Amino acid sequence: MNNRFFMLVAGLLVLGTGACVRKNRAQEIFHATAAQTESTPSAEDSGMSAYRLLGKSIREGDAGLWFSLQSKNRLAQATDDQKAEMRKQFVARPGIQYVPLAARAVGPHAAVSGRLDGTETKSYEAADYVLEDDAWKVEEENFSENPVDPRALYALVPPSNGDVHTIEFALAAHPLRRVRLEVFQRRRYCWKMQATRDESFLYVRFEAKAPLTNTGLEVYEDKSRPGAPVNSGVPSAWPMMKIKISTGDRSQAVYELQAGDVIQTKSTFDKNGKANSNRFFVLYHLILWDQANHVVFENNSSDTFTQLINAQDRFIDLKVPLQSLGLVNGQAPQIRIEEANFGGTNSPLRSRALSAAMSWPEAPAYVGRCSR
């Protein structure tokens, strides 16, 4: 029995209590997709209209309307018995208002950031949509206590070439500066970073000295150490990196980028729907902050649509939409990447940073110390 969908809808039915609001934390991930055409105002307007209809269904207690607005994939997560139970519990919440704030639509996918009025606590969400039978259908909803950053929409629905341009494609097109292998293999260095860019993305590749744990692999608690964190088996942690963008007026925008492994916990349920145990799986997580320490976007290697982070063999590959970095209309300023926690004029590690500005198509490389 799939209880995830049932529990999600049960949360929607008590929106008036604020029970569905989740904390804005590293594990909250938005889901999206690469698309195939450029964003159009009419598609964005229709996405916002679909979002308002979603609020109407909650406000009026119209289960039929609510179900008609869900994607086939989302509906498939619930059994017929669960859907029947949801319909019984679907009651009107007259005070609820779904207020669309911004939208982005590219090809068959869209994202709407919204505000939920009429709840006891402030609520915001990012709703992901797919186009089915010429209508927008809800694929995923993620709730937060904080508004969705407008720049996150470009990560939720990336540029139109996002399904074509992979880091392998970019690195082949723009050869890398190589770091001598013997330097990287020294014990004190556990990872290497390489980066390049094209007109749409900044691509970053981290390389570990040993193979990484596969995304989605189940791992287990150490029963001999009750309460101890579950070990992902990933051999090395990656540091936080700074992305520095220099514009023509000599100003500089600074972002911080963090990638690494996280443990996803999934509960198992008995026949009565009560959680009775936990299972643990390895995922890889990407988060981008701006200079004000505000989260721009997050992404996860388990996302079914757009994967801006992917792990395989010894590599973690990242894609950062340039529009999420504030670069629009084909801007091509200099981009520098360096380790956030090291640096300084006399630091030996700083000398290995991407001190030379990365003007496309250059692809510098960088090595870093062990942290595990």
Image: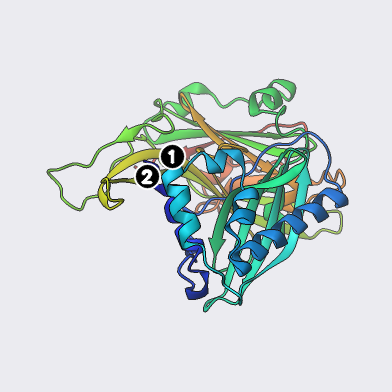
Query: Which element is circle 2 on?
Result: strand
Callout 2–callout 1 Cβ contact below 8 Å:
yes
Residues packed near mark 1 inside 10 Å, few (<14), some (14 to 19) or many (20 plus) = many
- Residue on which disc 1 sits: 283
- Mark before the other along the chain sequence, 2 or 1: 2
Indicate the amino acid at tag 2. Ile
**Residue 147: x %, y % from top left:** 63, 66
Report the residue that reaches farthest toward the left: 224
Residues packed near mark 2 inside 10 Å, few (<14), some (14 to 19) or many (20 plus) = many
Identify which residue is drawn at 26% across, 46% down.
270
**Residue 338: x %, y % from top left:** 59, 46
Identify which residue is drawn at 16% across, 50% down.
226
Which label belongs to residue 133? Answer: none
**Residue 9: x %, y % from top left:** 49, 56
Q: Quadrant of the N terminus?
A: top left
Identify which residue is drawn at 87% across, 52% down.
41
Whether 346 is drawn above or below 351: the answer is below
358 or 26, which lies in front? 26
Indicate the amino acid at tag 1. Leu
Q: Quadrant of the C terminus?
A: top left
Whether 271 is drawn above or below 198: the answer is below
**Residue 328: x %, y % from top left:** 83, 49
323 left or right, relative to 14: right
Q: Specify whether residue 23 is in view.
A: yes
Q: Quadrant of residue 85?
A: bottom left
Q: How many marks?
A: 2
- Residue on which disc 2 sits: 263
Whether 370 is drawn above or below 57: the answer is above
Query: Which element is circle 1 on?
Result: strand
Q: Specify whether residue 294 is in view.
A: no
Q: Quadrant of residue 119?
A: bottom right
